[in-house]
Image (cartoon, coloured by chain):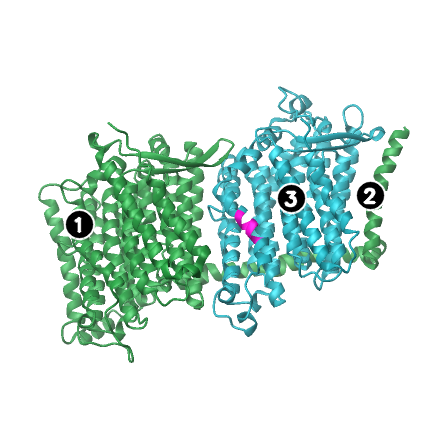
Amino acid sequence: MKAFDPVLAPYIVALPLIGALGLLLLGRRLRAVAGLVASATVGVGFVLGVIVLVQMLGVTEKGGHGREAVVRVWEWISAGSFSVNVDLLVDPLSMVMVLVVTGVGTLIHVYSIGYMHDDPRYSRFFGYMNLFVASMLLLVLADNLLLLYVGWEGVGLCSYLLIGFWFERRAAAGAAKKAFIVNRVGDFSFLIGIFVLSVTVSSLTVSSINEAAGGMTAGIATTAALLLFGGATGKSAQIPLYVWLPDAMEGPTPVSALIHAATMVTAGVYMVARFSPVFEASGGLALGVVAWIGALTALWAALMAAAEYDIKRVLAYSTISQLGYMFLALGVRAYSIAIFHLVTHAFFKALMFLGAGSIMHSLDGEVDMRNMSGLRKVMPITAFTFMTGWLAISGIIPFSGFFSKDAILASAWHQGRYALWAIGAGTALLTAFYMSRLYFRIFEGDLKVPEGVHVHESPPSMVGALIPLGVLSVVGGVINLPGLLTLDHFLEPVVGESEVPSGFTPWILGAIALLAGIAGIAFARTLYLLPGGATRRAALCERFKTPVDAARNKFWVDEIYGRGIVLPGKAFASFCANVIDARLVDGAVNGGGRVVAGAGWLFRRAQSGYVRSYALTFLFGVVVIFSLLVFRVAL
Amino acid sequence: MTELPWLDVVIFAPLAVALALGFVPKGRVETLRTAALGGALFVFALSIGMLVSFDAGEAGFQLGTSLSWIPEWGIGYVVGVDGVSLWMIMLTAFLTPLSVLASWSIVERVKPFFIFMLVLESALIGVFAALDMFLFYLFWEASLVPMYFLIGIWGYEKRIYAAMKFFLFTLAGSLLMLAAIIFLYFSAAGEPTFDYQSLLGTPLTLGTQRLLFLAFFAAFAVKVPLVPLHTWLPDAHTEAPTAGSVMLAAVLLKLGAYGLIRFAIPLFPDAAREMTPLIMTLAIIGILYGALVALVQKDLKRLIAYSSVAHLGFVVLGIFVGSIEGMSGGILQMLNHGLSTGALFMLVGALYDRRHTRLIADFGGLAKSVPVMAGVFLLVALSSLGLPALNGFVGEFLILLGMYTRYSWWVIPAAFGIVLAAVYLLWAYQRVFHGEPATKENRGLSDLGMREIAMLAPVVALIVTIGVYPKPFLDRINPSAEQLVTRMRRCSVDGTTGASIPEACGGGAGAGNVAEAP
């Protein structure tokens, strides 16, 4: 049988990279075609990805082993006993990610052609977007941890550039910086994790780390796993580092869809799945942390989403929450289920962000849900596609989100983690509630838009991207249904099979998950759709004043970080600069100088004629040497 | 085969160009500029010849010349390059023409300015090439003179104070080193000599090593600079003209790190090892303290100056951790810092030429008026904060990895420096380039011109190249780094007597003997 040799893989990364370089260097000269070029590089990448996938599926060795290949691109860093290369790892897991990134990426690029049409920095936008796709592909295809880290930082950079794309706005510039710095804190942890693994394993390739994991002590494995996970909490916006993601909504909406929903923020999930043997080797502790952080983040963010009025921020909190579900899945060893939810979430969340963008495009950038309603009548395609996303995330059968979220809850139950299951199920109810609130307020009821706005459906390039994503949100769940191409089996050679309960249990669990979704929707309906909803809302807010206030203020976490870390940090820096450096260290220097000056000769001479004095001193040195030498020779 | 003595040519060619400039009438500013640029480019071309002749697999000194100069005093003209000095010389030869390009705005006393620039280049290359202690000291002191004048004559408002401070700090250290060199001369086994390679095996008691090491260390720590000997640096950087800041940050600071690598550690390995914890502590303090102080600077040049304190802390860390990864990373980081910080000073110089201010608060919203400059500035800042796929990352990663392999969790405070670097650089970037241009001066600025692009593009190209494909650089650094680390770690002190064991330091399996200069 022919060995699997995916020679096309490097081109999948190279294409958008070339696109990015071209667009960023040639800039405005390419304006007319920038959007098309950028979309084409990603689109062709998707096609290449499909070809590689077909090649991979052609390898039918038992259990799908042999569907793995490493492609050497060049030698990278080597010093002492350390060496890493630019190698790409093509296996089922990386291909799933490649297809999501290029597939959803292409749709969002096409959407952006319409959305960004009038922006003066149109070419640059697509240059950054292409650079992002290239970095993300490098991240998922990297065969070693350090190359993964290159992609990891690369996507972070693009996130910075794109959040701050409208840098004239103070808030956008601040949000970009905040995103980068908060992520750096996570990267700091990640980097030390790389050191630990590098020294323990003596190699950073995926295969050697995962093979060596079994032989690691629980202490080392736990340390390494938690340090890597620290990086994931930054990039994937989990407690305690999630604070940058809501602010990141300052970026153009396609950016939020691509980077802050479908792809980049899932990098942490991918990374944990990729190195799952290290997490396994920790003997439960690391996975427990992952599961609990995930579950708590899911709940915490859902609470804030329910109190938010800014459409994009609701979606941002929702993303944080859904990422929490993915980590919950990872933490209960359901790695393939986590990837499954990653994929369906990429569909329906990208869809909803693009839907939000469509609304903003129509309403002159309005994002406050209180200023609009009944848009279904004037924006039918946006409304209809958004509805599929809403039902998918709410976990309504047969929409995609039902299958993936149900599988996560079932896995938690199966592992006997009933508390985690309960948090997950409760959050599912909350999710359905806040998403229904969003949908009802925007699309249902009487038509209301801000004054002076001419509301209209978006142009074809935009709705053209909504429709395929809408379809995927509906049917995306099929990829894990038993059959020829079950995701779980496809990923099994990489991450093992996820265990789910058998017998009657899954049906009962599924029914509970579905009921949670329906209950959430029903509850939102009584508050936002049925007559008298406003009074019921007021009564409810009055009754639960404290928790509602807390959620509206985002539990004051930004303020706590600001006053607890940023302000003291700045004060300490000022102290270092103004007191220690200026008065103490330099004061000693100048004081010493003055003493010398007081003593007179050297310093005054030096000041009066610096040219002469220097020459004098230099000569003095030379004379000293020579006289000593002469002295020596004379002896 | 008769090949050009590349190294000697590269050392003295700038001096020859400087001499030639002396014959150009001082009024002909255009001719002077063009000639200086042409000359500096010619020297760079020669240095490429040297680079090509350099054998990447060889750890010892190459392309050397050894002439007897004053034989009765044991003074020789001995030069040679290894993987460390090679890149330092390349850096010097690379940045001099760019610094000349950055000096178009110099209109007063143009002729002496360019002459000093080229003399400086000769002296610096000489320092890196010298393998005779006397010759080294001569070049070392000689490099002070032109820099002193560049700051003192063409600098900004407080130039006299800054030049004086620079001079006194350096001199204080150098004099101690001079005394140590003379002591070493008399301690040589056999005939007294200044020959570096003969002195390497000098048997010294631990007590003597300590004193001599400290004397050398004083000279080098000032130059690096290590906290708390750093306060000359912000003043000198800030007051120097652009070209002066570039050469100062990119090359002169490397003299300190280079001196540690070449002299302080190999000559006194036992003392060096003994002091390692102290020096590493100072380096880590430098990384964190430099970053914190940089954070609250109001003047862009001062901010970059303090960032140098932090970056050089990484370099010193790499040199002293005693692992090959760390040493290679440290050496590469010397080159990287030269490129990134050099480019930052060029950019701040370009800003000053336009706005006649360096205060961060005077800027704002420049990304709108000068988009190309904003883009280049960001890329350079990212390289400075260690973004992977750019040069700074490769060096810092190897340094921290090397540190982790030997000192495990001590790496944490050092690695935290990369978080702070992101904070001070991106915050400054935001205040200068983001937002709406608040004042009318910031609105109508012209973007980078052809001359400025010609000056920045080569640096940017190298920044990316080293980040993406550092192999050609590391291939030439690694053998020398390995040899240096072996030498540093092998020597051992007899615990009972405190005397070093010369056999272990100098001889043994030939590993301690560097290749003789041909």
Q: Element type at marker 3? A: helix
The answer to whether residue A416 is above or below residue B371 is: above
Q: Give chain B's shade.
A: cyan
Residue depicted at x 66% and y 40%: B46
Based on the displayed image, in which of its 4 quarters is residue B195 positioned? top right
**Residue B241: quadrant of the picture:** bottom right
Q: Is residue A489 visible?
A: yes
Q: Is residue B238 left or right of residue B110?
A: left
Front: mark 3 or 1? 3
Q: Chain of mark 3?
A: B
Residue linked to disc 3 = B44
Q: Residue furthest left?
A: A504
Which quarter of the rendering shows the N terminus of chain B? top right
Q: Which residue is mark 2?
A: A621
> Which image quadrant is residue B353 in?
bottom right
Residue A456 placement (x, y as % from top left): 24, 72
Describe residue A443's horizontal placement relative to residue A357 as left or right.
Answer: left
The amino acid pointed to by label 3 is Phe
Q: Which residues are magenta?
A: B456-461
Front residue of A323/A101: it is A101
* Co-location on one chain, circles 3 and 1: no
Q: Residues within 10 Å of mark 3 (few under 14, many from 20)?
A: many
User: Which residue position holds label 1?
Assistant: A477
Q: Residue furthest top?
A: B509
Amino acid at dot 1 = Gly
Q: Which chain is green?
A: A
Q: How many marks?
A: 3
Task: Kindly identify the amino acid type of the residue bearing the numbered disc 2.
Answer: Gly
Distance between the Cα atoms at labels 3 and 2? 32 Å
Question: How far across and down, in percent of the image, does residue B251 sit?
Answer: 65, 46
- At which x and y percent is residue A479? 18, 46
